[in-house]
Amino acid sequence: MTIHSEDKAFANRLLAGDEAAYDELFRVHAQKVYRFALARVRNPSIAEDMVQGSLAKAIPKLAEFRGEASLLTWLCSFCRFEILAYRRKERTRGVEVELPDDLPEVARALEMVSASQVDTPDAHLMKKELTYLVRTLLDRLPDRYGDVLEWKYQEDMSVVEIAERLEVTRIAAQSMLARARQSFRDGLSELAAANQDALLGPS
């Protein structure tokens, strides 16, 4: 198990009341959590509220941080709860909230297939292999999951447009798209062991 010793030491400084550590927490780490939240809610003021809520919950629990994950990952875990609470609250108000992908590897694989620029023979071959693998995976997905992923990532359709094409509500389309992403990721994980470079590309 990897122990993030520097992050653990930083947490110990916070626990000791080190003012410089707290300055760094709010100047550096809070900004990273803010970018994490903003990418998911797309509203600066809401993202700021989520950062404040996350830190307010995380700081009293710093003694529980053991360094098994990075401090940023640990802080973002609190932010995820803030995001889930926000989504539940908006749904109870009848507001439909469309959040961006939380599965970047799905978007990356599908968008690579759609990319038009191929610079070298090796890149062309990799794209050809990737296209075959992704096409095979899409064809194996249940129901219309393959269709909605193609519409979303390769035709750049919005959730509203997907809902209209499926003749369902926007919420139903969002739900189907979420299930399709997860199903695709599960299949991608199985293929990645043998085709990691082609499927996931450079990190």
Image (tube, rainbow, N blue to C red):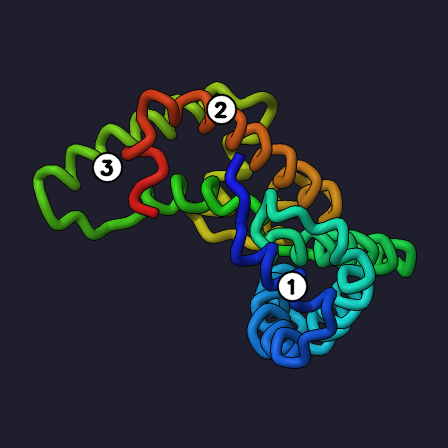
* Residue 200: quadrant of the picture: top left
Q: Position of residue 102 (x, y in %)?
A: 58, 48
Dot 2 falls on a residue whose secondary structure is helix
Kindly identify which residue carries mark 2: 187
Q: Nearer the viewer, residue 60 or 46?
A: 60
Q: In this rendering, does residue 96 appear at all?
A: no
Kindly identify which residue carries mark 1: 37
Q: In this rendering, does residue 104 appear at all?
A: yes
Q: Position of residue 26 (x, y in %)?
A: 65, 76
C-alpha separation, residue under disc 3 versus residue under disc 2: 18 Å
Q: Nearer the viewer, mark 1 or mark 2?
A: 1
Q: Residue placed at 67% from the left, 58% from the top?
A: 75
Nearer-N-terminus badge (1/2): 1
Q: Position of residue 166 (x, y in %)?
A: 64, 39
Q: Amino acid at mark 2?
A: Gly
C-alpha separation, residue under disc 1 versus residue under disc 3: 33 Å
Q: Nearer the viewer, residue 117 or 42?
A: 42
Q: Which mark is residue 127?
A: 3
Residue neighbourhood size for the residue with mark 1, other residues' Cα within 10 Å, grouped as few (<14), some (14–19), many (≥20): many
Dot 3 falls on a residue whose secondary structure is helix
Dot 1 falls on a residue whose secondary structure is helix
Q: Residue placed at 59% from the left, 76% from the top?
A: 24
Judge left or right: residue 26 versus residue 90: left
Judge left or right: residue 129 versus residue 155: left
Q: Residue placed at 53% from the left, 23% from the top?
A: 141
Q: Amino acid at mark 3?
A: Lys
